[in-house]
């Protein structure tokens, strides 16, 4: 059985977001493919904060360092990720 895939354009991707297609999941458009992105986990949030603090100390007032951390850090299980992928991407 042959599998047929379709490359997404940036315009089509933005239209899908505007219509709410991806409102419950975090996705990115990478080389024309919609990729399910995992939620930010605790280790990532910690590392992000540590790097931002280091850069603030190093650069002082020469640069504005802003770090973004997800308001709720919830890592979906493997099965939840598969379910979301099937729901939105297949």
Image (cartoon, helix red, strand yellow):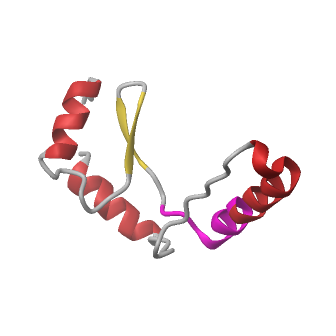
Q: Nearer the viewer, residue 10 or 36?
A: 10
Q: Residue 72 versus residue 59: which sits nearer the camera?
A: 59
The count of marks equals 0
Looking at the magenta stretch, what is its main secondary structure? helix
Corner quadrant of residue 42: bottom right
Whether 31 is among the magenta residues is no
Where is residue 52? Give x, y as percent. Answer: 73, 57
Q: Position of residue 44 (x, y in %)?
A: 65, 63
Where's the C terminus, which quadrant?
A: top left
Residue 34, percent from left and from top: 34, 38
Question: Would residue 19 be visible to someone looking at this image?
Answer: yes
Q: Which residues are magenta?
A: 39-48
At 46% from the left and 76% from the top, the residue drawn is 72
Farthest residue, direction right: 58
**Residue 85 found in image quarter:** bottom left
- At a point 58% along the width and 68% down the height, the residue shown is 41
Where 42 falls versus 67 (above or below)? below
| Image coords of residue 75 (percent x, y) | 50, 72
Q: For the point 36% across and 32% down, which residue is it? A: 33
């Amino acid at each position: 059985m042959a599998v047929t895939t379709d490359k997404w354009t940036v315009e089509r991707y933005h239209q899908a977001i505007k219509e709410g297609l991806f409102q419950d999941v975090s996705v990115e458009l990478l080389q024309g493919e919609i990729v399910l992105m995992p939620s930010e986990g605790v280790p990532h949030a910690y590392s992000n904060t540590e790097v931002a603090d280091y850069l603030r100390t190093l650069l002082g007032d020469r640069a504005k360092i802003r770090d973004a951390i997800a308001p709720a850090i919830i890592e979906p299980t493997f099965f939840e990720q598969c379910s979301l992928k099937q729901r939105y991407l297949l």
